[in-house]
Amino acid sequence: MTPRFPFAPLLVALVMAGAGSTAWSNTLPGKSAAVGIVPHAALKTRTVEYRDGDQVLEGYLAYDEAKPGKRPAVLIVHDWKGVGTYVKQRADQLAKLGYLAFAVDVYGKGVRPQTAEAAGALAGTYKQDRALFRSRLLAGYRAMLASPQADATRTAAIGYCFGGTGVLELARSGADLNGVVSFHGGLDSPAPEDGKNIKAKVLILHGAEDPFVPAKDVDAFLAEMRAANVDWQMISYGGAVHSFTNPEVGNDASTGAAYNASADRRSWGAMRQFFGELFDASGGKLADR
Amino acid sequence: MTPRFPFAPLLVALVMAGAGSTAWSNTLPGKSAAVGIVPHAALKTRTVEYRDGDQVLEGYLAYDEAKPGKRPAVLIVHDWKGVGTYVKQRADQLAKLGYLAFAVDVYGKGVRPQTAEAAGALAGTYKQDRALFRSRLLAGYRAMLASPQADATRTAAIGYCFGGTGVLELARSGADLNGVVSFHGGLDSPAPEDGKNIKAKVLILHGAEDPFVPAKDVDAFLAEMRAANVDWQMISYGGAVHSFTNPEVGNDASTGAAYNASADRRSWGAMRQFFGELFDASGGKLADR
């Protein structure tokens, strides 16, 4: 199945907030529009329709058209709500940093649960059926690499919550990735022996007080990593609970999910440092594995 | 007791290996001497004699004389062998990055154990007597701040192994530091209630397979941090054992202590990111606590 790009490209010229800036607020469109300032980036974004078998899926692609050549390509796996504002903003952030970013659609075109109940039920479907989950993720990975701007030799995947579980499943499938990053993702696996398939370096960004990722899951995950001799790192952020990177969930940590500005900023910085190691130092795929 | 600086300053002009370079090999003096290349940094280093009560101590100070103004000041706490080549090289690295670096002497002038047995016994003395340990560390902290190039409002402490325990003891003493960083340090405390005195942000850089920092110590430490509501982060490096930043210990991980180039590079980068948060973003002490 060949990925298709039926939508006319939408060219949005944005003033970059500075390559060193990672604050969430700097990514909001309202802060990017400035008259009379020379734009440093030409952010190109579009929805991308593609398929996994008969299922039509709709992802979101972003890259900086001002940057020449093929870019390291970063897949973004959404949380339980599906492709929405949050992952699109993350894609835009990554594009401004020079990456090609593609927000994969696990659920299907138009399938965007609006309530926690619906999102939980849908996410549960894929967490129960890891083969289907992997199939959807691999379809997105192939769709991303079909973009002529993507450098297939320099790839990573990041994911949030449900999507953090997703990037690990993608790695466990044996996908050819330089690295994966889980932001407050679930770490459980029904088949820990699949850890042996992992080629990617693994970075886990974990809220130390996340009630949805309990210590027993962390311990089991680390046992999986050790048994498979994976190149892994885990950062635990004190005081952070689930969804610590997402302002949409609010600030009440007592609910078990809350935004944490400090952990958000630190985890984004850790991801950037990780990408630097993956893409800049080695200059190519898997060079220093 | 006023710190004294009796030694004539030694001015060493070195070619910087590049501000972004953190590789250990770039810090070796042999790589720094280059004829005919304009130096970007004027690395100034000297031994500093100071006292804790009647005990004479001898630390090592380094800063870049080409940089104007007061610098953020970083205390470096040595491992069980005392002030030696390793911490001096780390001080030089930090100086090249723009910090004033001071390698504190916990043991006393001329007390430099040459064998593991002697080092272990000496380190054990201070780990048993935390009041004495803190007193020596605070003396070094004051000696550092006596340098006119030190910015007393922007301070941190880093430490290796025994020194990692040291920076935590310094923090537990209530010392006025923006942050402390432990590299493969011991995390145990005989008085976990002292966690409440900690003002510094805490970054723990931990070898996930370090047999000298067992899981029970990690758990107790995190309980201490939580109980005291400390701003803490911990990074665990897969495959890394004790002393992972120190090439002097060799490469045989089966001994429980071994250099790990990847964990060395990553942990140094994490420290730099942490310092950026402490010193660059806030622009002053404790601004964003």
Image (spheres, coloured by chain):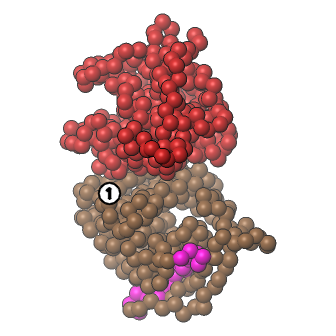
Chain colours: A red, B brown
Q: Taking A154 as reference, is B254 above or below it?
A: below
Please name the residue shown 63% across and 45% down the image. A280
Q: Nearer the viewer, residue B134 or A166?
A: A166
**Residue A5 appears left or right of B224:** right
Q: Taking B96 as reference, is A24 above or below it?
A: above
Q: Which residues are magenta?
A: B50-68
Q: Which residue is mark 1?
A: B231
**Residue A153 appears left or right of A24:** right
Q: Nearer the viewer, residue B218 or A10?
A: A10
| Magenta span includes A167 | no
Q: Taking B106 as reference, is A179 above or below it?
A: above
* Residue type marked 1: Asp
Q: Position of residue A51 (x, y in %)?
A: 50, 12
| Magenta span includes B58 | yes
Q: Position of residue B59 (x, y in %)?
A: 52, 81
Task: Report crowding for label 1: few under 14, some 14 to 19, many 20 or more residues within 10 A (C-alpha).
Answer: some
Residue A64 visible here: yes
Q: Position of residue A210 (x, y in %)?
A: 30, 40
Task: Using the image, name the chain to which the residue with label 1 belongs.
Answer: B
Residue A135 visible here: no
Magenta highlight: main SS: strand
